[in-house]
Amino acid sequence: MWKSGGPPAGFPAYAGAPGGYGGYGAPGYGGYGGYGYMDTQSPLDAEIQVLIREIHNEQQLMEQGGEWGEQFKNAKRLLAAEADKLENSIDPEWLEVDIAKPIKVSKKVLIPNFRHPHFNFVGKILGPKGSTLQAMAKQFKCHIYVLGRGSTKDRAKEQELLQSGDPQYAHYGGPLHVKVETIAPAHVAYQRIAGVLEQLSTTLQPASKSGKMVF
């Protein structure tokens, strides 16, 4: 498997990733895929902007609160995540399907190494020189990553990056997983994600050298 910090020569890094996650990834789409949509705002757009401002105000209060603000670690994390979702239309609660308005769908799939600790799921997902992962990303037009604890061979480096406090390496503190992302109009985005999930439901089944499933 590849070392943390980047893929081997010829394997593309995640387009637009902030500095690289340090795990493995394959790009499957570029930008918004040429989708255009009417720019007439829905009634929800104004509400969302108000909510975003309120969240940022609450975040600022916590940051200025000194020791008082430091006790709300989980609240800070949840507010930051919610602001990011609202600002970037990530997994929105409300959808507009009468227009080709792009949304971002992002899902995390647990790798069942905790059930089958001796099976090399990462190797099976990646395939030879990452070819399996690249093919899946290209077929379903998704960005696909292998992230979390154990997503590289260098556990010490993972811990070092995690302790750096850099948000892009926070995934090393979580379980081993596959992260799937795509940007497209809602019905297209969810079809893409569903295609990846269907393929992963087979890929994440352990098999012995004889090809039989391991239980």
Image: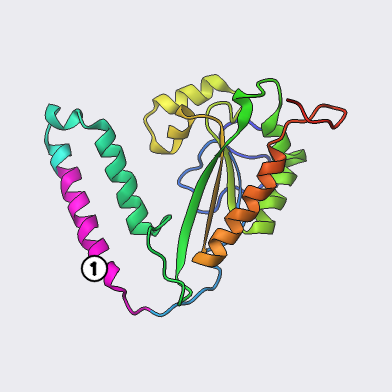
Q: Residue furthest right?
A: 210
Q: Visible in this render: residue 90?
A: yes
**Magenta segment, principal secondary structure?**
helix
Q: Which residue is mark 1?
A: 46
Q: Is residue 11 left or right of residue 50?
A: right
Question: In the image, which residues are magenta?
Answer: 39-60
Amino acid beneath label 1? Ala
- Residue 144 x/y as whole percent: 59, 47
Badge 1 marks a residue whose secondary structure is helix
Give the camera-side residue of 8 and 86. 86
Q: Is residue 46 magenta?
A: yes
Residue 160 image position (x, y, % from top left): 46, 23
The quadrant the N terminus occupies is top right
Is residue 29 in view from this perspective?
no
Residue at 52% from the left image edge and 73% from the top image edge: 35
In magenta stretch: residue 17: no
* Residue 98 percent location from the top left of the image: 45, 77
* Residue 5 position by quadrant: top right
**Residue 138 to residue 127: above or below:** below
Image location (x, y in percent) of residue 39: 37, 78
The image quarter in which residue 202 lies: top right
Residue, x 38% and y 63% (percent of image)?
A: 94
- Residue 96, image quadrant: bottom left
Quadrant (top left, top right, bottom left, bottom right) of the C terminus: top right
* On screen, residue 191 above or below 59: below
Mark 1 surroundings within 10 Å by alpha-carbon count, few (fewer than 14), some (14 through 19), many (20 or more): few
Q: Residue at x 69, y 48 (%)?
A: 199
Q: Residue at x 63, y 24 (%)?
A: 115
The colour scheme applied to this rendered structure is rainbow
